[in-house]
């Protein structure tokens, strides 16, 4: 039966777009569903400011009356202008293991991007680097992590069959908290701790952390400015980001470094929510929120989601200062391991430091490219 493509125009269409992955992944034991409240907000142009910077196209593929695939096309106009690029993006690609479906979806986005004057397309990629990016190509045997891709292995072949090749890889790292750090880390920690220019801030209450969230995100704009795909947030987006994630942040696992009272470095970990979200099937009510909260209390894994040092304060040992204090906090709370979120392969300094500390890469994700 032929594949028919339909634009997502109505709320009913959007419901199919959002919930289709659950049907496709129903036999995928490691699949992590999205939190559906967040999905409805994310794909709503009235609530997600990223739409105002972009041309977008959302498609569903059907065979008869059955939805069999989805994709989103994005042209990030402000990013392209800032970087002097003519790149399109495809993202949120999901389909059954059928090259006819993937070809129909991807080729339609390519043609759309061509008509918009684009010269290259990358993907899977969302509005920015904080959205799930790439396809997993290694590490399928391990449980997934919040805000990272969670695809079936066949998706890689479906994309490569359309003529795509590697653009860039990201890795995730696993760190066993029983590992003994090299002695040089103790020396660096003592030296930086004794430096009167810096103050390590450790908090225990969310209300005490809240005033630092916007300064932290402003600093992140500076620290991440060189990172592939990064789009700086304005204050409105920062407030939305803070409102979204502050409720799941345990201040014990946020470390801040201040210089003259200004945030110049931070490290943020959250208790793994994977098992709770899987058990909730992505729904907060009636009992999903209870599952997620229970999982966050029972987990022995801490997911390191974000971290950064302002460029003019890098190479001064601040990352060692924060990391060692975070390790101490995690061990005191009876955590057993860290999982470090997506790290670009081009961030050689961070990768070298993690491997020196004993972390090992165990998942790899790939963003693909194709000239148009």
Image (tube, grey):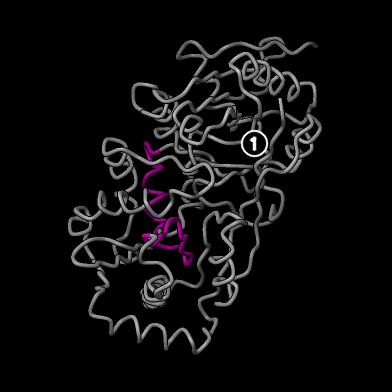
**Front residue of 182 and 345:** 345
Mark 1, secondary structure of its residue: loop
When asked about the image quadrant of residue 306, the answer is: bottom left
Please provide percent x and percent y for residue 261: 18, 64
Determine whether, in the image, residue 351 is placed left or right of residue 272. Answer: right
Residue 286 sits inside the magenta stretch? yes
Quick one: quadrant of the C terminus?
A: top right
In the depicted structure, whether residue 254 falls above or below residue 288:
below
Q: Is residue 51 magenta?
A: no
Give the left or right position of residue 312, taking residue 102 as reference.
left
Identified at 53% across, 65% down, the residue is 350
- Name the residue at 51% across, 83% down: 181
Give the extent of the magenta segment.
284-310
Q: Quadrant of residue 150?
A: top right
For label 1, count other residues whose C-alpha is less than 10 Å away and answer few (under 14), some (14-19) or many (20+): few
x, y percent for residue 95: 69, 28
Left or right for 213, reference 113 = left
Q: Residue at x 69, y 36 (%)?
A: 369
The residue closer to the viewer here, 283 or 133, is 133
Identify residue for label 1: 26
The percent coordinates of residue 342 (x first, y second) are 55, 54
Quarter of the image where the N terminus is located:
top right
Which residue lies at the image location 51% right of the left edge and 36% below the top edge? 83
Q: Residue 265's quadrant in the figure?
A: bottom left
Q: Is residue 157 above or below residue 100?
A: below
Residue 323 x/y as whole percent? 42, 72
Q: For this rendering, which residue is in front, 60 or 45?
A: 45
How many marks are shown on the rendered structure?
A: 1
């Amino acid at each position: 039966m032929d594949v028919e493509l339909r634009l997502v125009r109505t709320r009913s269409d959007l419901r199919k777009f959002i919930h289709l992955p659950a049907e496709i992944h129903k036999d995928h034991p490691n699949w992590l569903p999205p939190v559906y409240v967040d999905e409805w907000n994310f794909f709503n142009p009235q609530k997600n400011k990223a739409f105002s910077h972009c041309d977008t196209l959302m498609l569903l593929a059907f065979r008869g009356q059955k939805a069999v695939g989805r994709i989103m096309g994005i042209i990030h106009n402000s990013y392209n202008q800032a970087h002097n690029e003519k790149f399109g993006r495809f993202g949120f690609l999901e389909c059954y293991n059928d090259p006819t479906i993937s070809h129909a979806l991807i080729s339609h986005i390519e043609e759309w991007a061509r008509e918009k004057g684009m010269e290259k397309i990358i993907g899977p990629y969302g509005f920015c680097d904080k959205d799930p990016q790439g396809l997993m190509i290694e590490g399928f045997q391990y449980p997934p992590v919040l805000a990272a891709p969670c695809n079936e292995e066949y998706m890689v072949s479906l994309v490569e069959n359309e003529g795509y090749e590697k653009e860039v890889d990201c890795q995730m790292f696993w760190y066993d908290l029983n590992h003994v750090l090299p002695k040089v880390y103790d020396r660096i920690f003592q030296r930086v701790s004794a430096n009167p220019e810096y103050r390590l801030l450790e908090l225990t209450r969310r209300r005490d952390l809240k005033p630092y969230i916007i300064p932290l995100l402003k600093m992140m704009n500076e620290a991440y400015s060189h990172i592939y795909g990064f789009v700086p947030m304005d204050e409105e987006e920062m407030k939305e980001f803070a409102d979204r994630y502050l409720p799941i942040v345990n201040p014990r696992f946020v470390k801040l470094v201040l210089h003259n009272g200004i945030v110049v470095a931070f490290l943020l970990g959250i208790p793994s929510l994977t098992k709770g979200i899987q058990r909730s099937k992505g729904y907060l009510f009636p009992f999903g929120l209870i599952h997620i909260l229970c999982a966050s209390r029972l987990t022995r894994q801490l997911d390191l989601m974000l971290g950064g040092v302002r460029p003019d304060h890098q190479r001064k040992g601040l990352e060692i200062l924060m990391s060692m204090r975070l390790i101490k906090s995690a061990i005191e709370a009876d955590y057993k391991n860290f999982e470090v979120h997506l790290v670009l392969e081009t961030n050689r300094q961070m990768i070298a430091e993690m491997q020196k500390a004993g972390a090992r890469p165990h998942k790899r994700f790939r963003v693909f490219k194709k000239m148009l």
